[in-house]
Image: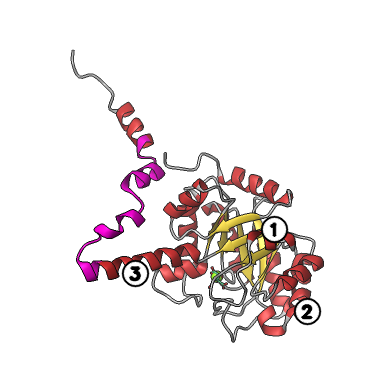
Amino acid sequence: MLYAKQTAAAKRAAFRERLASGELLRFPGAFNPLSARLIERRGFDGVYVSGAVLSADLGLPDIGLTTLTEVAGRTHQIARMTELPTLVDVDTGFGEPMNVARTVQELEDAGAGGIHIEDQVNPKRCGHLDGKEVVDDETAIKRIRAAVDARRDPNLLIMARTDARGVVGLPGAIDRMKALVDAGADAIFPEAMATLDEFAAVRASVDVPILANMTEFGKSELFTVSQLRDVGVNIVIWPVSLLRLAMGAALSGLDELDASGSLAALTGQMQHRAELYELIDYEGYNAFDSGIFNFNVEK
Ligand SMILES: C[C@](O)(C(=O)O)[C@H](CC(=O)O)C(=O)O
Ligand SMILES: [Mg+2]
């Protein structure tokens, strides 16, 4: 009931242990708190909170319009629904290094297991679009140093994302990754890698966990978990996938409703009321309720 039983600190400690084991961890993106419960139920290792999903959910483009307060609020709602670690996209950290420091503390308080901070200029754009720009080494390094210094829980994973691959090419991006690790990044998110060989090159160059972004319709091919495991990737995200699937299903449903005037033909594709109630744990709340009101008025 009400939901995660563990504290955020315990979840962060468990996340660090899983990462240290070297196994590949799978983090689908939750598009709402309820879908985080589904991700946990299906045996995945963590929940990703995507900036692209957060902004799309509000009907906005992913160009840095969402605020720290919105991202922290969403993280809080999602992280408290699951025992799994939550990895959160905090874009560029919402401003100058001092803002990055505040972002880290707010996200820590919101229950994040880890956050990734990218080296794009403000305003940022989707990592799989052309025409991105990245900040210089000094600014990128300052962001990561500020993040590392600001955390109070050493288990909060500070992941540095670099968008340099699409701007200066792979060798320059790898130099940037090394500098970010030297600045204290616990993990690296090499954005928009084109091939498995590029992931392998990153793996050979840095000594910290690396993430693969398997977002659809972007610059990377959709590699399988076992292909990514074979090149030494440690975390894989499917950031927007569940939202895309859900929106695709919603669109088909609306078309069917428009065409036939009823959704009776689609009930087989819907999450059943019983499944929804089970996922939400209605029974747990019911037991709680009858416990509270379990008294006898008879004298
Ligand atoms: C990972 C990402 O930062 C996100 O916000 O989910 C996006 C995903 C996307 O737009 O497909 C990105 O890759 O920039
Ligand atoms: Mg993003």
Dot 3 or dot 2: first in sequence order is 2
Name which residue type carries label 3. Leu
Residue 242 left/right relative to 17: left
Crowding at mark 1 (Cα within 10 Å: few <14, some 14-19, many 20+)? many
**Residue at mark 2:** 171
Magenta stretch: helix, strand or loop mostly = helix
Q: Is residue 14 visible?
A: yes
**Residue at mark 1:** 234
Q: Compared to 203, does 12 lie above or below?
A: above
The magenta stretch spans residue 182 = no
Q: In the image, what residue occupies the spot 51% across and 39% down?
A: 5
The magenta stretch spans residue 274 = yes
Q: What is the number of the mark on residue 251?
A: 3
Crowding at mark 2 (Cα within 10 Å: few <14, some 14-19, many 20+)? some
Query: What is the secondary structure assignment of the residue under circle 3?
Result: helix
Residue 210 figure quarter: bottom right
Q: Is residue 135 visible?
A: no
Residue 176 picture location, percent across and down: 75, 75
Quarter of the image containing the C terminus?
Answer: top left
Residue 68 picture location, percent across and down: 50, 65
Dot 2 or dot 1: first in sequence order is 2
Q: In the image, what residue occupies the spot 44% across and 64% down?
A: 245
Along the viewing direction, whichever of 81 and 24 lies nearer the viewer? 24
Q: In the image, what residue occupies the spot 63% across and 67% down?
A: 223
Number of disc labels:
3
Name which residue type carries label 2. Pro
Q: Which residues are magenta?
A: 257-283
Residue 234 figure quarter: bottom right
Along the viewing direction, whichever of 237 and 271 lies nearer the viewer? 271
